[in-house]
Image (cartoon, rainbow, N blue to C red):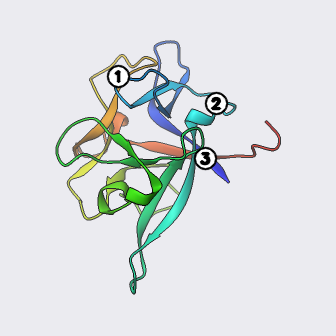
Amino acid sequence: MHYLITSHCTAPGGQELALAVNHNPGQDPVIVLWADPTDDHQLWTPIAYVRSGEGPQGIAFVNAGTGEALAAPEDNSGAVMVALDEIDDRSTWTFGEDDWAIEEHALRPYGSDTMNLNLFGGGPYNPGNPVGVWDWGDGQPNELWKFTLVDTDAV
């Protein structure tokens, strides 16, 4: 089961932009690209994060192309990727809105109600634009993400 995670923001031509792992080493590790459900670097598998003896704490998003999990830095800066054996609170996410009738949601690092996953900048947004964690801006378009289930058998 994989999800394509797209931003509420679109590219100048109206194309959807999807959360992706950057193919280019040495550059921002997490970016947006034109949405392409056939690109494994844009597909994410949600995995429940459970501490020993406790219930689920949040969701780790594992990239299908790298096998690594999306992680938040400790401050307002670019998102990073971590190995599966390094999943902890900073690589675990919660949804900022519990109303599932709403199509787009904020993604927040576990334990934070003030920071969220953010498409950096004030637009226009283009493929290659970096993604990171920033203080909550009351639901601005660059803070909202849509999750679309992708049937990889049909792609």
Q: Is residue 63 above or below residue 1?
A: above
Mark 1 touching mark 3, by CB under 8 A?
no
Residue 103 visible here: no
* Circle 3: residue type: Tyr
* Circle 1: residue type: Gly
The image shows residue 82 at horizontal and vertical percentages of: 39, 48
Q: Residue furthest left?
A: 75
Q: Earlier in the sequence, mark 1 or mark 3?
A: 3
Q: Which residue is mark 1?
A: 26
Q: Is residue 73 above or below residue 35?
A: below
Mark 2 touching mark 1, by CB under 8 A?
no
**How far, Cα to Cα, is label 2 from label 3?**
11 Å
| Secondary structure category for the residue under label 2 | loop
Identified at 23% across, 60% down, the residue is: 112
**How far, Cα to Cα, is label 1 from label 3?**
26 Å
Q: Which mark is residue 3?
A: 3
Q: Which mark is residue 39?
A: 2
Q: Is residue 56 left or right of residue 75?
A: right
* Circle 2: residue type: Asp
Q: Is residue 36 above or below residue 114?
A: above
Between label 2 and label 3, give the one nearer the viewer.
2
| Secondary structure category for the residue under label 1 | loop
